[in-house]
Image (tube, rainbow, N blue to C red):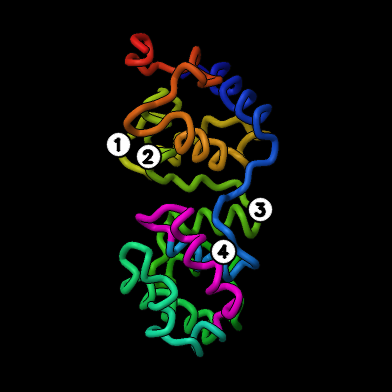
Amino acid sequence: MKKADIEEFFRRLSQASPTPETELQYVNDYTLLVAVVLSAQATDKGVNKATESLFKVVDTPEKMVALGEARLTDYIKTIGLYRTKAKNVIALSRMLVELHGGKVPHDREALEALPGVGRKTANVVLNVAFGEETMAVDTHIFRVSNRTGLAPGKTPLEVELKLLKSIPGPYRYHAHHWLILHGRYVCKARTPDCPVCIVRDLCVYKAKAVL
């Protein structure tokens, strides 16, 4: 996609949704981190349903450690991979208490050292909690970037780096939210809603021509 088309792509998305936000529900930096960890291979809606009651009683790593793995499992058992996630959340909470004074670190390396936290999760936390211009490439962003021709790549990291390099500065902070929402509600995996897409004319997706 040409530089001018990329700028127009994000201009339209920004015009449609000037201040997009994560759809995960959270009450502070710590609960944001937990919610993002729980959202791996799960829907935001499913995570929110589980954490609605959890975050009413647990909103710090100290409280999570005190809650314990077994009780945490009861709260999140409707989420996929809940046993592994419960183990990781308790372990990362303990590390936050022991190594970071109970605070979520504003540091990529420190975040990625936490159990259950990879590059994508760290990017979300750095963007939402700390205002950094990061690109958390999930399945939606990976699909949209490749399908539209915005930033084609074979791996999430390749797509991430291409997006960060090509997206104009004024749009970089909100870009990953715009792309996630576009992929979730318009450029869907099986049945992209091309007729209502506001960037359809900029997209290289060939199948749209037969819709």
Circles 4 and 2 in contact, beta carbons < 8 Å: no
Q: CA distance from mark 2 to mark 1?
A: 7 Å
Image-based side of 82 in relation to 11, left or right: left
Q: Secondary structure at mark 3?
A: loop
Q: Which residue is mark 3?
A: 131
Amino acid type indicated by mark 3: Gly
Circles 3 and 4 in contact, beta carbons < 8 Å: no
User: In the rendered image of this protein, does residue 27 appear above or below residue 4?
Assistant: below
Amino acid type indicated by mark 1: Lys
Amino acid type indicated by mark 2: Glu
User: In the rendered image of this protein, does residue 4 appear above or below residue 18?
Assistant: above
Comes first in the chain, label 3 or label 4 = 4
Magenta segment main secondary structure: helix
Circles 2 and 1 in contact, beta carbons < 8 Å: yes
Comes first in the chain, label 1 or label 3 = 3
- The segment highlighted magenta reads 39-62
Q: Residues within 10 Å of mark 3 (few under 14, many from 20)?
A: few
Q: Position of residue 108 (x, y in %)?
A: 51, 61
Q: Position of residue 160 (x, y in %)?
A: 44, 41
Q: Secondary structure at mark 2?
A: helix
Q: Residue at x 47, y 29 (%)?
A: 186
Circles 1 and 3 in contact, beta carbons < 8 Å: no
Q: Position of residue 22 (x, y in %)?
A: 58, 50
Image-based side of 54 in relation to 170, left or right: left
Q: Which residue is mark 1?
A: 154
Q: CA distance from mark 4 to mark 1?
A: 29 Å
Residue 32's mark? 4
Q: Position of residue 138 (x, y in %)?
A: 41, 46
Q: CA distance from mark 1 to mark 3?
A: 28 Å
Q: CA distance from mark 2 to mark 3?
A: 22 Å
